[in-house]
Every structure is written in C-alpha cells, then in structure tokens.
Amino acid sequence: MPLVCGGELHLLASRLFEPELIINNVRQRGITIINSAPSMFYAVLEWPTRQAGVLSSLRWVFLGGEPIVAGRLKVWIDSGDCRARIANVYGVAECSDVSTAYTLVDFDGYSRSSVPLGVPIFNSKIYLLDENGSEAPPGEIGEVYIGGDGVGMGYEGDAQLTRERFVPDRFREGGASMMYRSGDLGRIGPDLNLYYHGRVDQQVKIAGVRVELGDVESAIRRHSDVKDVVVIAVTIQGERNLAAYVVCKEGVDTTGFSRTLRDYLRANLPSPMLPSRIELTAQILLNPNGKVDRKALTESFAASNR
C-alpha cells in the first residue's frame, strides 16, 4: 500500500517482536502508518519505557487479524498524544488481505458492543450464508463469504482445499467468478456495518448447547475491572468445558476476583456459557505474528491438567 501511494516502507532490523524497536523506529523515522495485529499494538502502547508523544507522527493505525479491544486503545486516544485515526480492517490473504474497513469513532460505545468490521471496500463483496448456502436474513448471523476482484485462484498444489474454500459466486452478474468461504461468522447491523461473531471452528457444544467463544469473551470484557480475556474450549474429566484467561486492569485487587467475576457472569450468561475455569494472568500469550496464541493456551491447559 505505501509503495503504490508514493510512500516508503520501513523494515525492522529484527525478526522478533520487539515493542521498543517499533517505538524507536516510529520516533526516528517519523513513521505515519502502522499496520499490525491489535495485540501487537497494545504491547507498543503499554510498553513501560514509552514516553509521551513518541508516537505522535502516526496518522493512521490499521488493525486487523483479530477483534479489537477498544478499551486498550482509549487511554492513548484520550491522552492528547494520539494524532492518528484508527481503522479496523478485515480480510484474508486468499482475498488480497483487506475486504472491509471501519474507522473507529465511539470508544465509549465499543465497551457495550464489538468494534464493527465496516463495509466492503470498493471492489469487494460480502455475503452472509447459512448452513444451507442461502443468504442469512438481515440481522442474523451467517458465515462470511468474500467476493469481488480480490479473490484468489486457489491453493497451489491443494485441489481439495481449493474446492472447499473457493466456490462459484452465484450472486455476481456478468460471467463466472469465485467467492471465498472464510470460516468467520458475522452479521450486518442496523448501521449496515459487518460485525464479527467468531469462527465456525470456535463454536463448541456445551451440555448440548452451541456456544460461541467470542460471545463469552464479550460478556467478560464488559466487566469494569477486566482489561482483556481469551476463552478456549477444554476437556475436564472427559467433559467439554470453557476456560477463561483474564487480565485485570491495573490497580484491581485480584484477591477473590475470580469468584466476583463468576458471580457477575452467572447474572449475565446462561449456564452453558459459564467458564468452568477462570485463570487470572498478567498477559495473554501471543504467537510470533502478534496474535493471541489460542493453540498454545489450549496445549498449556491440557498439560497442566493431566
């Protein structure tokens, strides 16, 4: 994107994720645009040695790859040091990376609802289909299919996966074209924005009830003392259950907080959505790409409960 717009692309002198290196590059080179996973950018904002104004050259921050926790951006937004606009960008590599975009405006409101994924960019299409391949009714959750000019041709050397994911776009007029089955769940809100509702493969059945992990995470984040959370599906004594890894806000007394949080959730969630385990942690484990490492958390939980 920077190169085709006459800008510069600055590469970091490290293959590791080093927040201080990113901060120094922004300051020394006057970086104006950052594109990263949200969890990676939170670490930059919360780096202990970051000084006020060091990120003031930024004009745009593009965040994508996982849901945004707006509360972890709000301190920077309200500090007076932020001169950037923040965009939530959604898409997959199979469709040229970005298919929808939304510029964040109501940071207080996002504490009550998720940050929208926005509307399709000019050459993309978004379809929400049910399990039968029919369009989901307005406001209902469906699987996200991406169409338009950015859709790729398939996976090199994997014809079977190509047939599963790249399917004919029967909604597009003017000749044969393809759309991509993303595996993401979404709905179109009253504001006509696309909203993310988790992954098809992150839906689990608890006591015979289908539970979406993202809905449980959203409910936990609404607690005023919660900074961040990740919910994973685990097996405890042969039964499918949920485990929540919770990061509390600074200054919160964590003594007995798990019990307090559990009482809060009982009043706000049906029993199948209640986590069987609540683990308080200082930070959420990230993978090398800066995204939440759900796989590592699941493996760690299994190892500690053998």
Image: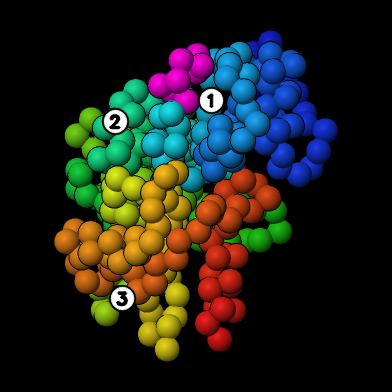
Q: Toward which corner of the image does residue 220 lie, by quadrant?
A: bottom left
233 and 98: which is toward the camera: 233
Amino acid type of the residue tagged 2 in the rendering: Asp
In depth, the one of 278 and 155 nearer the eye is 278
Please determine whether, in this image, residue 149 is positioned above or below residue 179: above
Say few, some or many: other residues with alpha carbon within 10 Å of mark 2 (under 14 / 14 to 19 / 20 or more).
few
- What secondary structure characterizes most of the magenta part? loop
* Magenta stretch, residue numbers: 76-85
Residue 206 - label: 3
Q: Position of residue 293 (x, y in %)?
A: 57, 57
- Which labelled disc corresponds to residue 108? 2
From the top left corner, tell me how far across and down residue 191 is, in percent. 23, 30
Residue at the extreme left of the image, as rendered: 267
> Pointer 3 and pointer 2: residues touching (CB < 8 Å)?
no
Q: Residues within 10 Å of mark 1 (few under 14, many from 20)?
A: many
| In-front residue for pair 247/172 | 247
* Residue type at numbered disc 1: Val
Q: Residue at x 52, y 82 (%)?
A: 305
Question: For the point 45% across and 75% down, which residue is it?
Answer: 234
* N-term-proximal mark, 3 vs 1: 1
The residue beneath circle 1 is: 61
Say what secondary structure mark 1 lies in: strand
